[in-house]
Image: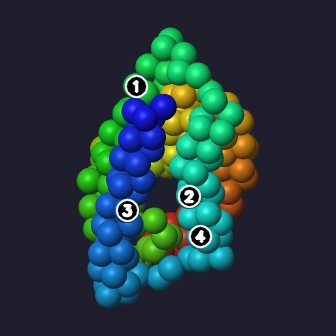
Amino acid sequence: MLAYTLLIVAVAGERLVELVVSKRHAAWALANGGREYGRSHYPYMVALHTALLAGCLAEVWLLDRPFLPALGWTMLALVVASQALRWWCVTTLGRRWNTLVIVVPGLPLVDRGPYRWLKHPNYLAVVVEGFALPLVHSAWLTALTFTLLNFALLAVRIRVEDAALAEATA
């Protein structure tokens, strides 16, 4: 359980790095005429992602979830892959990437990196990590709860993002 706790702490640290990068990129976007969309759902995203990390630890420690090697190592590989995809998205979008929906009018849509094949590759990374991270240590309640709530939240987020991009590139 200690190794799993360290994994969750590492993921939390990575999230803090994301927020620092996001804040810098959001400032750039706004300074360059960017317009923010759909702010009302953002606090729910923050709460859900925070709850994911807390739920992983709580379920494993309080319900004494076991580490099942076949499941755990497979899910860890998916967590690592989702992190790689997430940072591929961040580096591909460059200054355009942030955790908010801010669109700078006049910029063309990005069509390189993972965006060559997927419209929203970062959300694929979020979905995979959301079920895989808890399942590294058999926290299936957290995996199920996060996944269901995340699908509902992503339905809103993707609708907002698609509308913002359509308006900005029209």
Q: Is residue 121 visible?
A: no
- The mark nearer the N terminus, 4 or 2, is 4
Q: Does the CB distance between marks 3 and 1 fall below 8 Å?
A: no
Q: Does the CB distance between marks 4 and 2 fall below 8 Å?
A: no
**Occupied quadrant, residue 29:** bottom left
Question: Which residue lies under the disc numbered 4?
Answer: 42
Q: Which mark is residue 77?
A: 1
Q: How far from the left and from the top, in percent, is residue 129?
A: 50, 39
Alpha-carbon distance for marks 3 and 2? 11 Å
Q: Does the CB distance between marks 4 and 3 fall below 8 Å?
A: no
Mark 3 neighbour density, 10 Å: few (under 14) some (14–19) many (20 or more): few
Alpha-carbon distance for marks 3 and 1? 22 Å
Using residue 49 as the reference point, say whether residue 41 is left or right of it.
right
- The mark nearer the N terminus, 3 or 1, is 3
Tag 1: residue type? Answer: Ala
Question: Residue at position x 43%, y 27% from top?
Answer: 76
- The mark nearer the N terminus, 4 or 3, is 3
Tag 3: residue type? Answer: Leu
Q: Which mark is residue 50?
A: 2
- The mark nearer the N terminus, 1 or 2, is 2
